[in-house]
């Protein structure tokens, strides 16, 4: 069940290569730099490597950690 939620959230945050390039000013070098600086993360998702903004992944990871702490208590 939790895995389905993770998959859904990842699906909502997928960037296509074209979107990522557009966001980084149409410049292949700017896109490459964003990947190298790890602002854009390639993640294996649904049998393909997809691109995600690192900040979206970190926000979601923090939400999951918070929910787990609320559900199972702080450890």
Image (cartoon, grey):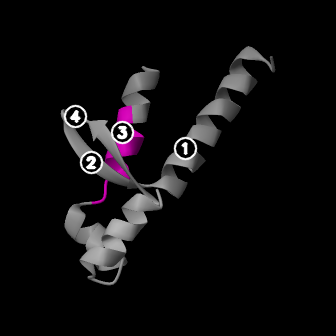
Q: Earlier in the sequence, mark 4 or mark 3?
A: 3
**Res. 50 mark:** 2
Q: Secondary structure at mark 1?
A: helix
Q: Earlier in the sequence, mark 1 or mark 4?
A: 4
Task: Please tell me which residue is depicted at 27% across the width and 48% down the height of the picture.
Answer: 50
Q: Tell me which numbered mark, 1 or 2, is placed earlier along the sequence.
A: 2
The residue identified by callout 3 is 8
- Residue at x 41% of width, y 60% of height: 36
The disc at residue 5 is none
Q: Position of residue 11 (x, y in %)?
A: 32, 45
Marks 4 and 3, Cα distance to the nearest angstrom? 11 Å
Where residue 15 sits in the image (x, y, percent)?
Answer: 30, 59
Disc 3 from disc 2: Cα separation: 14 Å
Nearer to us of marks 4 and 2 is 2
- What kind of element bears circle 3? helix
- Quote the CA–CA distance across marks 1 and 4: 18 Å
Residue drawn at (57%, 39%) of the image: 61
Q: Is residue 16 left or right of residue 1?
A: left
Tell which of 39 and 47 is nearer to you: 39
Upstream in sequence: badge 3 or badge 1: 3
The answer to whether mark 4 and mark 2 are in CB contact below 8 A is yes
Image position of 55 with respect to 5: above or below: below
What residue is rendered at 38% in x and 53% in y?
52
């Amino acid at each position: 069940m939790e895995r389905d939620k993770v998959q859904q959230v990842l699906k909502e945050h997928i960037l296509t290569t074209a979107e990522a390039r557009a966001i980084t000013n149409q410049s292949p070098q700017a896109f490459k730099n964003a990947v190298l600086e790890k602002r854009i993360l390639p993640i294996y998702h649904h049998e393909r490597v997809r691109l995600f903004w690192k900040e979206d992944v970190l926000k979601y990871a923090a939400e999951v950690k918070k929910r787990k702490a609320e559900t199972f208590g702080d450890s």
